[in-house]
Amino acid sequence: MQIYLPIAEVSVNAFLLLGLGGMVGILSGMFGVGGGFLMTPLLFFIGIPPAVAVATEANIIVASSFSGVLAHLKRKTVDLKMGLVLLSGGLFGAAFGVQIFKILKEMGQVELLVMLSYVVFLGAVGGLMFVESMRALRRSKQPNAKRPLRKHHNWIHGLPFKMRFRTSGLYISAIPPLIVGAAVGVLAAIMGVGGGFIMVPAMIYLLGMPTKVVIGTSLFQIIFVTAFTTLMHATTNYTVDMALAVLLLTGGVIGAQIGTRIGLKLKAEQLRIYLSILVLAVCGKLALDLLLTPSELFTIGAGE
Amino acid sequence: MLRFLIPLLFLASFATAQESVVAGMSQNRISISANFDGSEILIFGAIKRETPIPDYAPLEIIIAVSGPDEPTTVRRKERIFGIWVNKDTVEFEASPSFYAVASTNPLNEILSVADDARFSIRIGSRIPLTVEEDNQLNLPEFRDSIIRIRENQGLYSERESIVTLNDETLFDTTIQLPSNLVEGDYKTRIFLTRNRQVIDDFETTIMVRKVGLERWIFNLAHERPLIYGLLSLTIAIMAGWLASAVFRLLKIS
């Protein structure tokens, strides 16, 4: 069944969109990532104009994250306090990132920068997670092996403005989460995604939060950052396509519910390995696009 | 002076307009509704003449349907430090979003280069080489890339010998409109040529408009962007909540 999208001005198959939404939704629910880094390139591929794809994607992430966070709230795996601290940094960072995006757009190199940030961040995050989780998995298989001591006191603990995050079982300064939130906000705005794939590892490795809490908390703050981005896109570029969003998010919210349940059945280390493989695969695909000679050297962009 | 000129003008118009084209279309309004999946338009017509059919050269017909013009930026990639990067950019002032040419015979046999340029009929001459700023690049190369890319997307086409002409009087053809059609006024031009010269032309417009829900969404997005944005978010949150609630119910039962 073909459907004509009013803002994107293209006709696409409705079931294809439902399927795409569902697939990405499952991954989103499993890993606590918004799925933007997967969905946005997929939408480009099926012929949705990039500006519409990026803006509509933000709207879809709101839906799948909200659906996911409800499931997590019920299980009390959301650290609301930490989420709010991250969020206040995140909104600030997103507003700043939008400005950077505008400057780069005027310079005509925004596409390259977006691609490069994807490759660098997906590569770094995916690689780091993969190595770390493999090590953790090996450890769990050899119970006799000496468990390396985790550094409980590093420089982060010397910072002022300490706060107690009960759900995460942490007592740390509010400064690192604020900085993490802001940094992810900047990247999210530039790369046009929720930023979960950076936020999740940052929470695990930089803030030392337990994996079970990380996913719900990440989803919680993503809702607000992407809602903010959606409004910005809707009011400045008129590129949010409601029909496209409804189809994708119908699939997406159902997928997210299924994904959350799958995620709860998997071990944390396994979850991290799968996520890192997924992230590395997308990174590899994007790197190839940059390195291989394209079949068409010219691209048509919308006139300014 | 004027007394001499006016009859002269009349004479001149008589000499060129011995044959003129009258045309119609199966529809001059295309409605884009939610299930729009491309359309086909039948263009037909007849040649009106007061004198016998001239026999110095066969009559030929060229039909060109053109979507709205829009500024177009073309970028060329180049390899820098091993990665492919957009380098040279050309901003054409206008190129049509859609362009289809149909004719009775191969265009280079029925249309002179001079008349092609004068009436901007073929795809190449339809896109003027006027740019925002001249940066000494090979403009035809960039223009050809627009044509190549849009031909692959089914937006541009030159289909020769698909116009049927009977007794040099009645003609018809069908033009395919793709599903990724952009809203606007589609200018339809019909040219009569003899001996590769254009002897008459006719112009009409196909209006392509979004209707119903498509229209409503589009207008809301452009006229009330904040409300539209908030509505999109509300739908997203509702959908998220609904899915969660439904799954909870399924779990209990």
Image: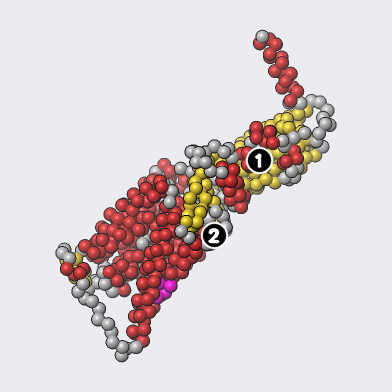
Amino acid type indicated by mark 2: Thr
Name the residue rendered at 70%, 46% in the picture.
B159
The structure's colour scheme is secondary structure
Magenta region, main secondary structure: helix
Q: Which residues are magenta?
A: A273-277
- Measure how far apart labels 2 and 1 are at the Cα level: 31 Å
Q: Are marks 2 and 1 on the same chain?
A: no
On-image quarter of the N terminus of chain B: top right
Q: Is residue A51 magenta?
A: no
Front residue of A4/B84: it is: B84
Residue A73 locus on image (x, y percent): 30, 68
Name the residue rendered at 30%, 71% in the picture.
A204
Amino acid type indicated by mark 1: Arg
Contact (Cβ within 8 Å) of mark 2 with mark 1: no
Kindly state the secondary structure of the residue where label 1 is placed.
Answer: loop
Residue furthest bottom in the image: A144
Vertical arrangement, residue A120 with respect to residue B151, above or below: below
